[in-house]
Amino acid sequence: MAETKKEYDLISVGAHPDDVEVGSGGVLIDLAKRGYKCGLVIMTEGEMGTGGTAEIRAKEVENAAEILGADILARFDWGDTRLEDSYDKRLALAQIIRDCRPKILLAPYPHVGHGRRQSHPDHVASGIITVNAANLAALKKADLTGEPHLVTRIFHYFLPPGVIPNFVVDITQHFDQWIKALSAHKSQFLNPEKSRDYIESLTAMARSFGMQARSKYGQGFCAVEPILINDIMTLAEIASETEKKVDPH
Amino acid sequence: MAETKKEYDLISVGAHPDDVEVGSGGVLIDLAKRGYKCGLVIMTEGEMGTGGTAEIRAKEVENAAEILGADILARFDWGDTRLEDSYDKRLALAQIIRDCRPKILLAPYPHVGHGRRQSHPDHVASGIITVNAANLAALKKADLTGEPHLVTRIFHYFLPPGVIPNFVVDITQHFDQWIKALSAHKSQFLNPEKSRDYIESLTAMARSFGMQARSKYGQGFCAVEPILINDIMTLAEIASETEKKVDPH
Amino acid sequence: MAETKKEYDLISVGAHPDDVEVGSGGVLIDLAKRGYKCGLVIMTEGEMGTGGTAEIRAKEVENAAEILGADILARFDWGDTRLEDSYDKRLALAQIIRDCRPKILLAPYPHVGHGRRQSHPDHVASGIITVNAANLAALKKADLTGEPHLVTRIFHYFLPPGVIPNFVVDITQHFDQWIKALSAHKSQFLNPEKSRDYIESLTAMARSFGMQARSKYGQGFCAVEPILINDIMTLAEIASETEKKVDPH
Amino acid sequence: MAETKKEYDLISVGAHPDDVEVGSGGVLIDLAKRGYKCGLVIMTEGEMGTGGTAEIRAKEVENAAEILGADILARFDWGDTRLEDSYDKRLALAQIIRDCRPKILLAPYPHVGHGRRQSHPDHVASGIITVNAANLAALKKADLTGEPHLVTRIFHYFLPPGVIPNFVVDITQHFDQWIKALSAHKSQFLNPEKSRDYIESLTAMARSFGMQARSKYGQGFCAVEPILINDIMTLAEIASETEKKVDPH
Amino acid sequence: MAETKKEYDLISVGAHPDDVEVGSGGVLIDLAKRGYKCGLVIMTEGEMGTGGTAEIRAKEVENAAEILGADILARFDWGDTRLEDSYDKRLALAQIIRDCRPKILLAPYPHVGHGRRQSHPDHVASGIITVNAANLAALKKADLTGEPHLVTRIFHYFLPPGVIPNFVVDITQHFDQWIKALSAHKSQFLNPEKSRDYIESLTAMARSFGMQARSKYGQGFCAVEPILINDIMTLAEIASETEKKVDPH
Amino acid sequence: MAETKKEYDLISVGAHPDDVEVGSGGVLIDLAKRGYKCGLVIMTEGEMGTGGTAEIRAKEVENAAEILGADILARFDWGDTRLEDSYDKRLALAQIIRDCRPKILLAPYPHVGHGRRQSHPDHVASGIITVNAANLAALKKADLTGEPHLVTRIFHYFLPPGVIPNFVVDITQHFDQWIKALSAHKSQFLNPEKSRDYIESLTAMARSFGMQARSKYGQGFCAVEPILINDIMTLAEIASETEKKVDPH
């Protein structure tokens, strides 16, 4: 496990050993390739999953992190299928935020889906803990070491139906490596005891996000307020370049 | 009036002589200052407004355009309070789009507000004509001269309540010049016969958008799909720089 | 038909001869009993209805208006099943608004239902014409006689599913008389050729609105913006008195 | 073209020659295989499409209809890119409904998308005409021949983002034949002049609907009110059988 | 209390002794009449209700269950007005699910109402526990006896305003027996100390659901994703048969 | 601290020492001026705020309460940044409700924002505790002294984006005094160590609510169901009088 006293540009938080890869892996690969420093925090050991064990999954997440080019900052054992927001957990994550001083936090969507389909309770809980920890990390009086740190933005992955992403990050270029990172979670996605073709499902999910924003493969995120832009033309330039690659007519 | 055969980066479309200034003026000032070329299309002469006349308002919009640093590409006389989508109007605007080849179109929100508050019917109509014209301009077989042109993105201003902007463009630096551009519409906003303090209202509107995205003054836009991003860190960088200016603690 | 030059407190607009009664009849009865002056405008003759004819329905609406205590200000023949917003229709209704100077306009919800269930196109059209006419009536330059008149508020009835009313008016005290007014439309609601029990359905609708706001029978309305209140305690007092009548424990 | 005097179980309506196939083709194949009689109505000749001509597309739609096992009931020439609701068009479609007496109508979603992404105006218009025509067909006094006919349910395809389908019909078994029907539209989907891989996009769309309801490939529909069910256990049985095929663990 | 080792088709879960009857009673009666096996789980003894005591209400629920034709699988004493999701409660319900192996679970809507009106916290908690228990019951590693069991679908009753049901089950035929089952809860609904006419309110609620889906009396449910359908014609057939009974013209 | 055995018209509940002032201060001033009796309940000591200490803030809230003309009924020490709904807290607040017998309760919005922007967890928790306490206070069997009391209506302040207020209370006349009450919280809003101009932000918020309902300054509230009205004309009269003051043309 990496020492946690260096500064990080972005931390992606997950409830189970494969959440970060599924929801934000393509973005992490992109950032690592361009020299940004990304960290991972995993809140449970995923010990209740049908495939694998806590030990096997710990090894898998190390392999996946290497493929992503990200450092594992912490792996907590906060209880698979029973993760709940609590003050102690907020403090533990807030300390990591103070130490690593990321500009961006990524975490699962912190509300149960409105309208339809309930989110997994561990996912919702991990999103709530993250938002609350970010709040604590910025408070001068919080019972934490180090200087207060205000994360610039928190974005959420694992959006329930009816929550349209604010923005989609194009991951077309990194698609193969993303699949490689997912495949590191053998016990989950390439387990012969499980009959479903998980890699196909995850590909379809990325394709579906991509279609929404007119790219090929994408990962969608929900911001907690409107995105702040200073140059509206960049939105057209990004779109135009990406579409040229997808659909070169 | 500018000749329309040059290429433009962005065209902002309005129903009345002051719509473009109110909804997108700060953004236009910003683009002009950074060397982008912006054009304006105004669909009616605003002859039904309580203040001013078609002639007075034509002069005002010229003054405003100069302050914005944008060219007036066309002023149509399509009927204040009675603007309606029609094939001829779509073709007329589509021809301008083909000639000017903008990457971005700005136009009023093209749907009546869902939930509450009806939008002005002219605003809705101008948004619909713009969306339909953009579609026609890209069709090889449309009855238009010049090469087909596909606008990269259309963004909408004049969002009804309940439509949260996808993104807000910070206009804090350009706020004074924006007020100057609005003030060019003397018959509308500085008319002693009208008792309301319009400049105060418009300032409050910009402040309200700014608050939503954590800047000082802003203009909000709704995209027709999730925004496509290629570098998630830029979102933090923009936010971080803007907030430093607004709130330098 | 009443002469239209007197001032009215409220005008309720409908597309067909029974719309106003169904959507706002209980409220009209209440206002008449307390000395307010209410007028009705009906946009089509309802000639396409399975029961009745234009002539029969004209007579029925006169009987209903008498039971409501409201004046019929105008009955237009703008085409049942083919009503559409047009500038001429806006002007015709705007002239009535200028002449009668109502504080409140009631009209069907002017948008097709969002999400599910399409509204009857005549209903939507009558709502749109009303909103646009109100706008015209306030414009100094509109091609109308008389002084400009700004209607204070427009409220909508016939809300599609998913549009929760802003407010419900309790009509429990006037329920019997409302049923009497509905029953004046014999060709529609008491027609032995039609098998459905319409009076039962309309009762269930009023009961359903009543339940939403904790009264017995109600009629629900959607305002075009948040309601403006100057004394928050009146909201509790109204609720408390009404509930005492419904549920005197 | 089929003679239109026979009775049909379902009519699927589209604005352009390939809409019905894209939005409802898998369902039509399923119904034909089980002995139901389905008809198609196409409102424009699709003459503005980049690929093909009115003549070529007419031939293609005949090939597609044969693959679907459906009859073409009518092909109107109501103007590609300029389709608009009008009374004459409502009457023309209402006459077909009276003649064919379908239980179900399928048509594009009849509202512009709320929230984001505008629908194609021809699609919205074709949905509106269909809803209005169904209303007319049931009116005794409509200027139509034959007996009044009340369609039991109208369901919509081409749902804009943010409109979650009420139900998804599993088309996994018919997927290959659906692709075959789409491929009959060579000028649109297999046109070497167009660079985009349309068949891939349409596959991704079907996969995306399938994922939402836990099947492999699906087509999603929005009902105009809650679905009426008489046996809640059938919902579990359908789900259970379909999932067994998709994911046989 | 029934022994719980037999297989059940459906389990309906409630927070208080009368919830299951109010929200799903008509559906349970229908299933019992057609030979399906339904079970009930009640999470609290309802001891805080103004009428009745834990003992009286236990007797009432037994009478009601007999009228419904359903077996009481478990009655927990988890605290009226203080029900909360916890791991132990999830496990207790998950064990029942494993033992009874139902295809369908019914439970209150598991989110506080979005938009307006807060749901009763016990209702929300009972919905959340049910969703989480269903998840646990399917996990091989859960600390439970018996084989993992995956419930096919979970549907929710007690929908807050603004949540339109996905589907409504027609209960017109079983209406009288449903009222009989409700009347078994004498201490709640026929208590002379309480002045409100509860049976009238519950009837109005069923009528209101019925109206939404064009039947007479109904119970509405929200699915957690689009309903999966394999034969679209059955939707028309059910509607057509039901409407014939309601409205035989 | 005031003795709590007198009857109150309204109680406003907050999580931190300044919440009640920010969200409902103008309304409290208005009520006090007209002779109504208002009380305040504050759930935490605000000890985690960057400015001030528990002691300083206690003094500030006393000053603010005096300016508002409201009595402090209770100040709890339930943990700033860690407030959570619990049965004990519900009981404590329910006892105050029984003792003070208010008609109206004001409290923060009790749900996390749907769509975007998470509410502060303490705010959400204080709203939930309030709703649950109100429920308990009305139950005969609750473990409380005094007679059951049913609060007539609960209204919420601190509405997340996307939650449009049901109603806005005009506070234009009381604006200066409201600013004075806010300024009593020196450690929060006039702290030279903090660089942000908080008073400007709070003014902009009040202006933004005012604009939504066409007054100058306002405070917005969300009711838990449609507002119940008995005289629709009062809505026009309030609007008309307020607008005359704001905009006297």
Image (tube, coloured by chain):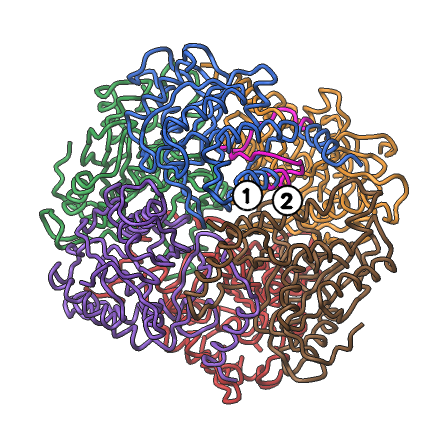
Chain colours: A blue, B orange, C red, D brown, E purple, F green
Hey, which quadrant is residue B43 in on the image? top right
Mark 1 to mark 2 CA distance (whole Å)? 10 Å
- As drawn, E169 above or below F8: below
Q: Which residue is mark 2?
A: B109
* Nearer to me, A184 or C16: A184
Identified at 22% across, 39% down, the residue is F86
- As drawn, C156 above or below B83: below
Q: Name the residue type under label 2.
A: Tyr
Q: Residue A224 colored magenta?
A: yes
Q: Is residue E6 visible?
A: yes
N-term mark: 1 or 2: 2
Q: Residue D164 colored magenta?
A: no
D3 left or right, relative to A186: right
- Identify the subunit bearing mark 2: B
Across and down, in percent, residue D125 comes to 70, 59
Hey, which quadrant is residue B109 in on the image? top right
A12 left or right, relative to C95: left
Screen quadrant of the N terminus of chain A:
top left
Across and down, in percent, residue B156 comes to 65, 40
E162 left or right, relative to F29: right
Q: Which residue is mark 1?
A: B163
Q: Which residues are magenta?
A: A208-234
